[in-house]
Image (cartoon, coloured by chain):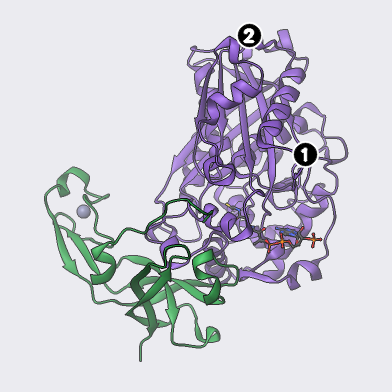
Amino acid sequence: MRDVAVIGVGMTKFGELWDKSFRQLIAEAGAKAILDSGIEGKEINAMYVGSMSSGRFVGQEHVGALVADVSGFSNLHISSTRIEGACASGGLAMRQGYLSIASGMNDIVVVGGMEKMNDVLGASATETLATAADQEWEAFFGATFPGLYAMIATKHMHDYGTTKKQLAQVAVKNHANGALNPYAQYQREITLEQAMNATSVAYPLGLLDCSPVTDGAASVVLCAAEKAKDYSDKPVKIIGSGQASDSLALHARRDICTLDSTVHASKMAYKQANLTPKDVDVAEVHDCFTIGEICAIEDLGFVKKGEGGKAIDNKITTLDGSLPVNTSGGLKAKGHPVGATGVAQMVEVTLQLRGDAKKRQVKEAKIGLAHNVGGSGASCTIHILEAM
Amino acid sequence: MGEGVARFWREIPQRYNFIGDRCGSCERIFFPPKESCPFCRRKSMGKMKEIKLSGKGEIVTYTIIHVGPEDFEEQVPYPIAIVKLEEGPQITAQIVDCNIDEVKIGMKVESTFRKIRQDGSTGAIYYGYKFKKRC
Ligand SMILES: CC(C)(COP(=O)(O)OP(=O)(O)OC[C@H]1O[C@@H](n2cnc3c(N)ncnc32)[C@H](O)[C@@H]1OP(=O)(O)O)[C@@H](O)C(=O)NCCC(=O)NCCS
Ligand SMILES: [Zn+2]
C-alpha cells in the first residue's frame, strides 16, 4: 500500500442557497480544490463523489458523470463514480479515493461530496432523510431521523445521567465555532437558554439539537504521498482509514447508546496509524444531533462510555480545550448537506493541520481525525490525518 | 413525497402476524425473520423455523415525534419506542392509548393491530402493530 496525501481542498459556503444550482455548487467546490492543489485537469486519474439522494432532492441521478461534466472534464473522459451511504456518502467517497491511490491504481484523484436539500418542501426533506433508516421496520411506523437519535438520547440520559443541558452545551459550543467559520450556515452564537428552550423536534431533542437542512458541496484532491510535495507546500498525509457497518435499524443493535460502526472503523484507523485516541489533537465528528457528538467522543475512545456529557461540562472539546471537537461548527452550525459532510470534514481537518484555519486555528495541531456516520450508525468512516 | 414519484409500502405478512423465526443452531429468535442467523451463519442454513411471537414486551427507549413525515403530520405529537419483546428481539413501533407523559423506559406493553399510515397521494391505508400499556 502506498501513502496518500491531501494536496488541495475547497468548499462552497453552506446554507440555504436559493440562487445556486446543484451543478454550480459542484463546479465551485471542485474548482476551488483543484486550484488549491495546483494540478491540471488532465492529471486527474479518477473522481469519486458522495451524494445521498440527489434523485429525491433535485431529481437528478447519475451524478458521477455529471460531476466530471460540470467540472469541465467531459473531453478528458475521466473515470467518475458516485458513492452512496446516506450521510456517510462523502466519507465513503473519501475512502474509495484513498484506496484507489493506496492500491497503486491511481496517482491523483478528486473526491467530491454534495447535496442540495432545500429545493424540496420540509416534510419531503424529512421523509427523504428517513430513507437512510430501515424503511420497512423503522420509517414505516413513523420513526424520523431526529426520532432515532432522540431514542439514543433518551437511553443515554437514562443509563448515564446525561442531561438536556449537556446536549444543549454541545450546540452552544458548535455555534460558537461556526461563528468563526465564513463557510458555515449559521455564523451566530446561541445561548444555553435558547438551546434548551427551542421547540421540540423529537423529545428530548429540540430544534437547536439538530443539524439543519443545507445546500453545499466540498472537494478534496488526493495524491500519492511521494509526489505530494511536487504540488503542495503543505500536504497532509492520510495515516489511517477505516470503515465499518452495522444493522440498518437502530433497534437491532447490540447497544442503543454505542455506535459499534464507529468503534470498529476507528479501531481500524488507529491501528493503521499506530496511534491511540490520546494522540488526536483535533477532531471533526458527526454531530447530526447533539447526542451524536456525545456518543462519538465516547465511541472514538476520547472518553469512557457514558462520560461524553461530563466531557462537555469540563470543556474538554471547546476550541481551547485539550481536544477541540468540531472546530468548523460541526454539522450543527456549519450545516449538513448530507453527501458533502464527510468531505467537508476532511477540508476542516486539513486546514487545521496546515495552520490555515484562521480564527478557529487549534495551536500545534499535528494529528486530526474525521468521523462520518451514515444513518443512525449503519455506516461509518474514519480518516486520521497528519501534517507532512 | 414529491408529487408524481411512485411510492408503495410493501405488504409484509410478518408485520400483521408477528411471525419471527428461531435459529435451530443457537435457539436465538429473530423478528423480522432472518434467512440465516448472524451468529451461526452457515450452521443455521435451512434450520430457521418460523415462530409466532407473543407481542408482549417492554420499552427500551422512546421519543415523542413533533416534526413528522408527510403521512404522519396529522398524528403529531406521537410517541415512538424501541420495544424489547419477551422472546428477545427489539422492534420500533408507536405507543398508543395512553398519555404521552406516561411513556417511560421499562413500561410493560403489548401489541395491538392498528392503522399505521395513509398514503397522502394514493389514499392507500397500511396496517400493522402499535403497542399499548399492559395492565
Ligand atoms: C430541525 C428541523 C426539522 C427544522 O426545520 P423547520 O422546522 O422546517 O425549520 P425552519 O426552516 O422553518 O426554520 C425556522 C428557523 O429556525 C432556523 N433553523 C432551522 N433549523 C435549524 C437548526 N437545525 N439549527 C439552528 N437553526 C435552525 C432557521 O434558520 C429559521 O430561522 P429564521 O426564522 O431566522 O429564518 C430541520 O432542520 C431538520 O429536519 N433537521 C434534521 C436534519 C436531519 O435529519 N439530517 C440528517 C441527519 S443524519
Ligand atoms: Zn444461531
Element under label 1? loop
Q: In the displayed structure, does residue B12 sit left or right of residue B4?
A: left
Element under label 2? helix
- Amino acid found under the numbered disc labelled 1: Lys
Q: Colour of chain B?
A: green
Do tag 2 and tag 1 residues touch (Cβ < 8 Å)? no
Q: Crowding at label 2, few (<14), some or many (≥20) Cα neighbours within 10 Å?
A: few
Q: Position of residue A155 (x, y in %)?
A: 52, 68
Q: Nearer the viewer, residue A201 or A360?
A: A201
Task: Name the disc covering residue A245, or none.
Answer: none
B4 over A256 or under it: above or below: above
Per the image, the residue denoted by label 2 is A43
Q: Position of residue A91 (x, y in %)?
A: 57, 36
Q: Residue shown at 79%/51% (left/top)? A: A186
Per the image, the residue denoted by label 1 is A13
Q: Which chain letter goes with mark 2?
A: A
Q: Residue shown at 44%/65% (left/top)? A: B119
Q: Position of residue B27 (x, y in %)?
A: 18, 60
Lower position in the chain sequence, tag 2 or tag 1: 1
Q: Nearer the viewer, residue A73 or B26?
A: A73
Measured Cα–Cα span from mark 2 to mark 1? 27 Å
B21 over A89 or under it: above or below: below
Q: Which chain letter goes with mark 1?
A: A
Say if residue B118 shows up in the picture: yes
Quadrant where the image shows the C terminus of chain A: top right
Question: Which chain did the image draw in purple?
Answer: A
Q: Are discs 2 and 1 located on one and the same chain? A: yes
